[in-house]
Amino acid sequence: MAEIAFQRLLVALEATAGTPVNPPTRYLNMVGTVTPRKARYRPDESRGVLAEYFRSADMRKWSEWEAEGPLDVYTLPLLLNTLVAGGIDGSGATDAEMTTSLTGANNDIVWTAVDGGPQGNAISIQYINPAANSSPLDVDVAGSGKAIKIYLATDVGGAITSTADDLKAAVAAHPVASLLVAGVDAGGDDGSGVVTAMAATYLTGGAGADVTQPPSAVLSHIWTFIPTMNADDLQAMTLYWGDPNVQAFQAAYCMPDEVTVTADASGTDGVTLSLSGQGQFPAKTAPSSDPAMLAAPMLLPTAMQLWIDAVTIGTTPVTGRVVSAEVTLPSGVTRKWLAAGPTSTLGFSAVGRGKRHMEMKLVLELPDMTQYDQWEAGTSLKTRLRLNGPAIETVAGPLTYYHYSEFDIYGPVDGLDWGENEGSNRTVELTILSEYDTTAEYDWCWRVQTDRNAL
């Protein structure tokens, strides 16, 4: 690689993880590298001479990649498909659904989530035999507010009498369940058949999210990335790196391991993003064509906003005190090397997910003791950090909408440390580790507002 001045990073989301995409669709607008790695096995042997090794063979191949640069609100939605929730491309949401498969005829129902997106995958439906005589049909929503329990009606002898039509009507009439799911007859069923008990079953297939517009907005769009809590829907990327005049490399199945966002109002850098991960061993394959480069707006640390609340998120601003913020998020992605026969490429062939949490570090000047007291009391907090850029538009109101990247994180202040700002005032560094919030049904989420509604 002789001409490092001309190196660049290009990217495309993969429709099938591990199948490379050519041509790439976006510039990453970051400085980075894709580095090939190999693990080689050398057995210990004793052959009567001083040589320590006599044989070796490659056992494993992969790549490691890293990138760093300004946080780019145009590229960020693409990256968040690989880090937070996949299938969000601006085209809308896929509804989660579940089709029953009961014994008998004309009794199966297709239950579909009312709201599209991965949130619907958290909804479960259970048909319960009350094991009692003359029991009425009843619907309840329990647990975290997504567990629908339908208690079936019985006759004087304890036999179930509820039909599929009865269940659809009962759910439609329930003030909470009706906001979660709607039911229609499955296949050629007509709904007249008596149902049977059914274990709690989750809806599946919910993906993506609608890219919404705030009130009166014309050009502004909000991308909301909520982590899927009970499934793995992250997408992989194909990365292209190198010098187009000398050699370009292509690495498929690239997924981040960790991302860090930093905003320091006391410094002179913009909001920065650094990420790192792994992928398959790179091929010496150049892109068939280059994507258009988008000149994305940059976010300014001095324009960041912070809200810290104990009840309703985003209602209590912290003003005139915010020095810096850092958000770190691991993906929880693990790689699996599985036996693939004598034609194995020595690369990983599957990935898994482990548990993860977001960590937010805030540095505040300390003219009052509000946050100190919250830390001392162990108060469960709802914190919103918004990193702003230039304005997108001003509409009736007047309301001005800005490019931004926004984090919601739930949980108490976990750690506290002292610091100073320019040698003239004491600061406090607060560390928040995300904890699951039963109302929000996640421990953190990430939003991006921009003037684009497509990747």
Image (cartoon, rainbow, N blue to C red):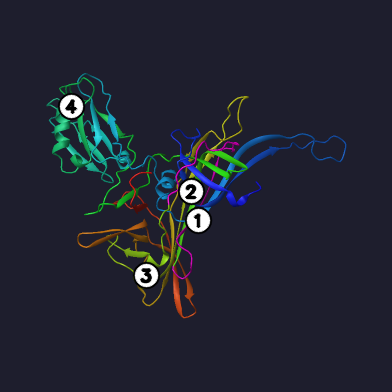
Q: Which sits earlier in the primary sequence, circle 1 or circle 2?
A: 2
Left or right of 242 on screen, residue 119: left
Q: Residues within 10 Å of mark 3 (few under 14, many from 20)?
A: some
Mark 3 vs mark 1: give the one in front: 1
> Foreground: 166 or 394?
394
Q: Are marks 4 and 3 in contact (CB under 8 Å)?
A: no
> Foreground: 9 or 131?
9
Q: Which sits earlier in the primary sequence, circle 3 or circle 2?
A: 2
Which residue is identified by label 2? 28
Residue 162 in view here: no
Where residue 31 sits: x, y (%)? 54, 53
Which residue is identified by label 4? 164
Magenta stretch? 265-294
Is residue 293 one of those drawn in magenta? yes
Q: Secondary structure at mark 2?
A: loop
Mark 4 vs mark 1: give the one in front: 1
Mark 4 vs mark 2: give the one in front: 2
Q: Quadrant of residue 425?
A: bottom left
Q: Which sits earlier in the primary sequence, circle 4 or circle 1?
A: 1
Which residue is identified by label 1? 69
Q: Are marks 1 and 2 in contact (CB under 8 Å)?
A: yes
Where residue 122 sits: x, y (%)? 31, 41
Using the numbered discs, state the Cα–Cα distance from disc 4 to disc 3 in whole angstroms: 54 Å
Which residue is identified by label 3? 371
Q: Residues within 10 Å of mark 4 (few under 14, many from 20)?
A: many
Q: Which sits earlier in the primary sequence, circle 4 or circle 2?
A: 2
Using the numbered discs, state the Cα–Cα distance from disc 4 to disc 1 in whole angstroms: 56 Å
Where residue 235 sits: x, y (%)? 44, 39
Q: Are marks 3 and 2 in contact (CB under 8 Å)?
A: no
Q: Compared to 450, does 122 lie above or below?
A: above
